[in-house]
Amino acid sequence: MIVMLSDWLTSYVDAFRVFGYLTFRAVMALFTALALSLLLGPRVIRYLQILHFGQPVRDDGPQTHLKKQGTPTMGGILIIGTIVITGLLWCRLDNVYVWYVLLTLVCYAAIGFTDDYLKVVRHDPHGLRAKYKYFWQSVVALGIACAIYGSAQRPAETTLVVPFFKDFMPNIGFLIIPLCYFVLTGSSNAVNLTDGLDGLAIITTITVAAGLAIVAWATSNVNIAEYLYIPYLPKASELTMVCTAIIGAGLGFLWYNTYPAEIFMGDVGSLALGAGLGVISVLVREEFLLFIMGGIFVSETLSVILQVGSYKLRGRRIFRMAPLHHHFEKGGWPEPRVMARFWIITLVLVLIGLITLKLR
């Protein structure tokens, strides 16, 4: 919106040309999202308290979590709302990639909101039943996947990029549909499982989003894309602003979500953010890179799968408690230590992921 206005004003005042620069808009998107989150955060927390939207806590989890009972949840409304507003302000709205991400965020946020609403307001401990949740996640993922494939105009948009292999980038064509489906549903549920400690899910999301912002910028630059041997995707440039909006909104939310948290994001935030990261990775053709950068998300998901599988097959548990962060809590690690160390690991993984762009 601001870009369209600046394009018109540039014909009268040349100084407005700065609003068209990618780096300027990326930084401004971050600052805008951060400012909105910090400004609206106390109001959202107060409103959720008035509505008694308090977080229910499992009594079989770490005992230190019992004191979190009643902490306002569904704070993902603040995160996703801020990202959407910022995206509409600073992105070029004629770019279809922007709409794919914003639509994904809103749709998955709606699914998460329904789940949170049933748990918090209707006091249903199961929330939205797993089969219904997965059904709607699948519907949205398949819809977005088909739209991405249908709007692809060049071979680069359906190319599979494999880390460490420079000369192996096959065009997978319509197979991008099932790939996108698995990435969106997988990343959405992975971030949801990671959201169990104060600040853990959001700071991990911020770090991965920062890595994807660099990838989106590099992918949309013809010279850098050619130098790195990655697909050149000019439309991916606008995803840089979406990524920095995620960073800004996440930092603002972290201000209130850091230990001890004043608000939780709930499923409305975790499902949407996970799907958002997933669709961005698909659009920039770096699904494997998301797997590397989001190693903590992957580990959390695998810990649940292994725990459930081991208990059903052998009647024994592998971890003290799943997801993985609870295993370390049960082992005596304070919550801030788990969060900090998982963030350090994520930062390292993001750097490794970025290095793979050149190591081909």
Image: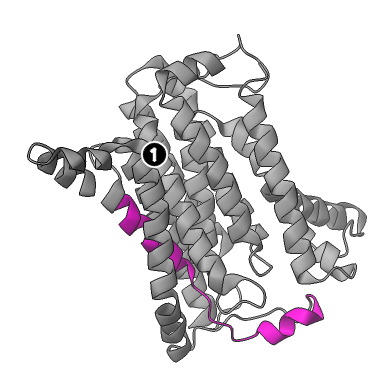
Residue 304 appears at what percent x and percent y?
75, 55
Viewer-nearest residue: 131 or 280:
280
Does the rendering let one see residue 231? no
Does the rendering let one see residue 160? yes
Instruction: Please name the residue that numbered disc 1 is placed on.
Output: 23
Q: Is residue 342 above or below residue 79?
A: above
Start and end of the magenta stretch? 61-88
Q: Quadrant of residue 264?
A: bottom right
Residue at the image position 50 percent from the left and 28 percent from the top? 285
Residue at the image position 45 percent from the left and 63 percent from the top? 79
Judged from this view, the residue extending furthest toward the top is: 167
* Dominant secondary-structure state across the stretch colored magenta: helix
Residue at the image position 47 percent from the left and 48 percent from the top? 276
Type of amino acid at the residue the image marks with label 1: Thr
Residue 90 appears at what percent x and percent y?
30, 48
| Colouring used for the render | one colour
Q: Is residue 348 magenta?
A: no
Residue at the image position 52 percent from the left and 61 percent from the top? 251
Judged from this view, the residue extending furthest toward the left is: 12
Q: Residues within 10 Å of mark 1 (few under 14, many from 20)?
A: some
Viewer-nearest residue: 294 or 119:
294
Side (left or right) of 117 relative to 21: right
